[in-house]
RNA sequence: GUGAUUGUAGCUCAGUUGGUUAGAGCGCUGGUUUGUGGCACCAGAGGUCGCGGGUUCGAGUCCCGUCUUUCACCCCA
């Protein structure tokens, strides 16, 4: 009888065995690629001090942080006046000093600063851990989800950016995703645009609005911009940006003339074309890259190149994103360290791959053979045989009790076990064991050696 | 945080203007088959109708609250 009280928190999920095998496949591919490019693993605590987390993600972000209540009698240290008239803002710092990590980049920055004397710059790390956001769940959006980050700090070389493009391509190739777009832009270009249209300093507002272009259309973006205080003159000057020519070189050329009086914009353009050159030298496939000046990305700490990857033909937000941040460690008292990184969203990749049916059929990590449990007398022989088979490197199990064969075969069938080995009095007498192929229903009398050979070859 | 939406058996869902013991399919258990799964047939088990309150002679059905689901906005992976 199921208890109606039990359940899991909103926006969290259990991952059953079938789920986990698929998820691990994604994790493994990403891990292999990260290591191939010289990134090494790092893990940080689930909880950080709130002083580390707050103020790094904007006001919105602070609200989305999960806070952890202090241990013990957490109310005893609260000021009496705050207990009389509780206000969340006053009360919170007194009752909670820890929070769940919101992303992997800020904890990484904290780690770099704390270990500045020990780490070898440029420092390349990857990190695959869950993060938590107290958001309202919806499609492709959970309160607990995994990020797979790879970042390099301590260099401003654009080789890093071009290698990120390579890593994205390789991960997607390994996952079997073919139709995807790596959108790339540069914050300096966005800054250049605000300069060019006479809206200096309104870059943040500009980013939020322009980011929605493909979603809500040009008119709605113009409307939003003017509601955010952009003048008619600015919107007029912005007009050419909406109508840039298609090709990369044409786009760059078009922007170059617009940016003649914007050093920042020009620098952004040079970075973009340099990244293309480097990626080409690395033999990256460039057809997936789309230089898109409307790409903005919310996180305020990006200062240079920004990336976002979308899978086409699937209704889903971005499945990966990243960019360069010039001064992330600055907030922790270590200025002048530039970093760039990429983050894959496994949960979304999973949903996309599931929808496109891209998960491989045969999972070698699952059970290959089950020894049926015919009767108590045959059990010792069956167990010895099981160990022999396991030692040969075949994933195998024995049905733990001698119930009806029908039930045992049914169990094997449902678990997708391809072979069942029958060991009863008959088999022990002849020394030939009955190996049943569950797919075809064929059954053969074979020695243990023949069985091991057959399954090893088949796998 | 704003605005909608959902909740009935393990799962997917029926359930009439409020009216007796709340149904189906799939799944599950047992049997037809005492050493042979999938197919078929037969039988059976399984439900505080999300939770709490209210209206009513009577609530799965109407009202309020709450939780949950899904979706849009904000924002984001």
Image (cartoon, rainbow, N blue to C red):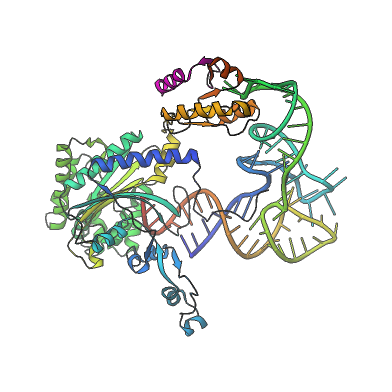
Q: Position of residue A62 (x, y in %)?
A: 39, 65
Answer left or right for B56 relative to A250. Answer: right
Where, by quadrant of the figure, is residue B56 drawn?
bottom right
In the rendered image, residue A445 lying in the magenta stretch gets the answer yes
Answer left or right for A359 relative to A397. Answer: left
In the rendered image, residue A125 lying in the magenta stretch gets the answer no
* Residue name at image x 55 percent, y 14 percent: A430
Please, is residue A48 above or below residue A342 in the view? below
Quarter of the C terminus of chain A within the rendering = top left
Question: Outermost residue toward the bottom?
Answer: A81
The reply to whether residue A417 is in sight is no
Q: Position of residue A52 (x, y in %)?
A: 33, 66
The reply to whether residue A173 is in sight is yes
Q: Position of residue A188 (x, y in %)?
A: 20, 55
Which span of residues is magenta-colored? Answer: A437-459
Where, by quadrant of the figure, is residue A64 drawn?
bottom left
In front of the other: A82 or A256: A82
* Residue name at image x 34 percent, y 69 percent: A51
* Residue name at image x 44 percent, y 47 percent: A140
Where, by quadrant of the figure, is residue B52 drawn?
bottom right
* Residue name at image x 12 percent, y 57 percent: A263
In front of the other: B35 or A53: B35
Q: Position of residue B50 (x, y in %)?
A: 66, 54
């Amino acid at each position: 009888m199921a208890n109606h009280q039990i359940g899991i928190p909103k926006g969290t999920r259990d991952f059953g065995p079938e789920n986990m095998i698929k998820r691990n496949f994604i994790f493994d591919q990403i891990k292999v690629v990260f290591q191939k490019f010289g990134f090494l693993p790092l893990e940080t605590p689930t909880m950080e001090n709130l002083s580390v987390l707050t103020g790094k993600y904007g006001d919105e972000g602070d609200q989305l942080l999960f806070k952890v209540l202090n241990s013990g009698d957490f109310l005893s240290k609260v000021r009496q006046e705050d207990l009389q008239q509780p206000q969340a803002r006053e009360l919170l710092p007194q009752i909670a000093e820890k929070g769940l990590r919101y992303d992997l980049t800020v904890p990484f920055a904290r780690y770099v600063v704390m270990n500045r004397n020990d780490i070898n710059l440029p420092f390349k790390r990857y990190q695959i851990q869950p993060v938590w956001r107290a958001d309202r769940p919806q499609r492709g959006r959970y309160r607990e989800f995994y990020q797979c980050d790879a970042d390099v700090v301590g260099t401003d070389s654009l080789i890093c950016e071009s290698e990120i493009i390579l890593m994205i391509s390789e991960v997607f190739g390994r996952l079997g995703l073919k139709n995807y777009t790596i959108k790339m832009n540069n914050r300096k270009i966005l800054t250049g645009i605000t300069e060019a249209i006479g809206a200096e300093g309104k870059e943040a507002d500009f980013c939020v609005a322009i980011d929605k272009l493909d979603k809500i259309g040009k008119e709605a973006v113009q409307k939003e911009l003017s509601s955010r205080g952009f003048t008619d003159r600015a919107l007029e000057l912005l007009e050419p940006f909406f109508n840039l020519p298609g090709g990369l070189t044409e786009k760059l050329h078009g922007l170059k003339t617009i940016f003649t009086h914007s050093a920042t914009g020009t620098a952004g353009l040079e970075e973009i074309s340099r990244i293309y050159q480097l990626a080409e030298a690395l033999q990256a496939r460039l057809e997936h890259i789309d230089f898109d000046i409307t790409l903005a990305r919310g996180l305020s700490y990006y200062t240079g190149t920004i990336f976002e990857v979308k899978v086409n033909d699937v209704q889903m937000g971005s499945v990966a994103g990243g960019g360069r941040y010039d001064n992330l460690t600055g907030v922790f008292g270590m200025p002048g360290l530039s970093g760039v990184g990429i983050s894959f969203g496994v949960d979304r990749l999973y949903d996309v791959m599931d929808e496109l049916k891209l998960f491989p059929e045969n999972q070698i990590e699952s059970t290959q053979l089950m020894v049926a449990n015919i009767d108590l007398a045959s059990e010792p022989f069956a167990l010895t045989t099981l160990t022999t088979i396991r030692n040969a490197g075949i994933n195998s199990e024995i049905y733990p009790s001698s119930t009806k064969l029908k039930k045992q075969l049914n169990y094997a069938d449902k678990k997708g076990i391809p072979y069942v080995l029958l060991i009863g009095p008959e088999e022990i007498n002849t020394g030939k064991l009955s190996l049943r192929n569950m797919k075809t229903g064929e059954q053969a009398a074979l020695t243990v050696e023949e069985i091991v050979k057959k399954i090893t070859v088949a796998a």
